[in-house]
Amino acid sequence: MPHLQELQRLLKPYFKLSSARLECLCHMILGLLLVNNVNLNKLAKSFCSQTLTASSYKRMQRFLKELDFCFSWLWLLIQNCLDLKDNLHLALDRTHWQFGKLNINILTLAVCYRGVAIPFFWMMLKKKGNSGWQERFEVLKRLLLIIPKERIAAILGDREFIGKEWLSALLESGVTFVMRTRENICMANAKGLMLPAKTLFRGIKIGKSVVLPKKRKIMGCELYVVVTRLPTNELLILLTNKEPGLALDRYRLRWEIESLFSALKMRGFNFENTHLVHEERISNLLFVMAIALLMGIRQGEFLEAEKPSKIKKHGYAAEAIFKRGLEYLGKLIATIYINVNALCQAVYRILVPPSLTHTTMGGVL
């Protein structure tokens, strides 16, 4: 199983795991790339070993129960594989679904990258509905332990992420942010009178944008306001603390976290098919998925560089980078007996930092 050994060798410097747990992790990553499903019964059948399927299933159960990982491990892997520089755009959002009476609610922070965001920090919310400012503050605090604020171009958030305490925490942190807000939010007009935003900007035509040159008072905070009217006639109202002229372009990148959730679910790994009910185990499963997602995106980049996708009339590529990479790796794994060398080369190319791809590291080149 040279492909499994190569994957273990390349991941070992990042993760402080025992040999047995690292091997199980690699089995699960390769299984996800092959079957595109988090269901443990399906993953157990994909293990490249002579172990009984029932034994592989129990092994994964123990792994997800006992794994104790650090988000900094995952960020280092993402950082090195993609060779990320500064000006990082980070999207904050939630994904939520129900399994029976259980609400699975995950607050996720991801780095925007070429059409799909990559998760590197998340929090299991022990409730149904929106996150509270205390939970967001914890995410912000943990973020700044992983990434220096000087590297962050902006944190992007939808209408859920509005509130006096949260906006105040963002301002105090010094991190640039762009948050969408509701039309009924009250803000000061040029004379300091507090009015609903939909009243202040009722004259804006569809397709037109307004960038207020001076900060306005909103929820006790002084913020720049940027507004445009969407084709649906709805107002898109953005609040930011710096560089208001860039707010609209920055906020467009927020859609990449929606692409992430789609890739984790129906268009990728069918996350909602998990029958896990313990939050820690669901979080550990997401850790495995994040690595598989990264590998699919990285492989897709190589394929895109070699043969760019056709661009459709709507301006988007016919096939997403992640989808191309996922299908390519899945095909290699499915035909392992004739493509084992190609798979080893792909794994090496994906996980070795770009600055070292021309240097022999004791593996396959």
Image (tube, grey):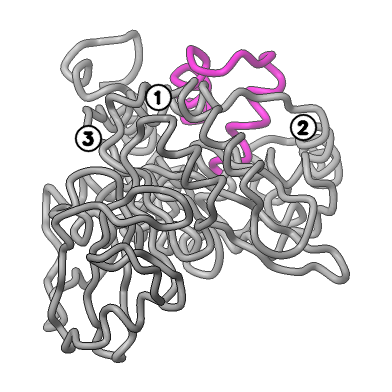
Q: Is residue 304 above or below residue 234?
A: above
| Residue 107 position (above or below residue 101) | above
> Which numbered dot is residue 87?
3
Q: Point out which mark residue 147 bears.
A: 1
Pick whichever, 117 or 49, lies toward us: 117
Is the residue marked by circle 1 packed among few (<14), some (14-19), or many (20+) residues within 10 Å? Answer: few
- Measure the C-alpha gap from mark 2 to mark 3: 36 Å
Residue at (68% x, 50% y) in the render: 43
Segment colored magenta: 1-30
Image spot of residue 68 (x, y percent): 72, 24
The three-letter amino acid code for the residue at tag 2 is Phe
Task: Tell me, yes or no, whether the highlighted magenta stretch contains residue 3.
Answer: yes
Q: Earlier in the sequence, mark 1 or mark 2?
A: 2
**Residue tagged 2:** 63
Residue 134: within the magenta? no
Q: Secondary structure at mark 3?
A: loop
Query: What's the CA distance linking mark 1 and mark 2?
Result: 28 Å
- The residue shown at (55%, 58%) is 269
Which residue is at 18% across, 71% downward? Answer: 316
Which residue is located at x 54 percent, y 70 percent? 266
- Residue 240 visible to an observer of this rendering: yes
Label 1 vs 3, first from the N-terminus: 3
Compute the Cα span from label 1 to label 3: 11 Å
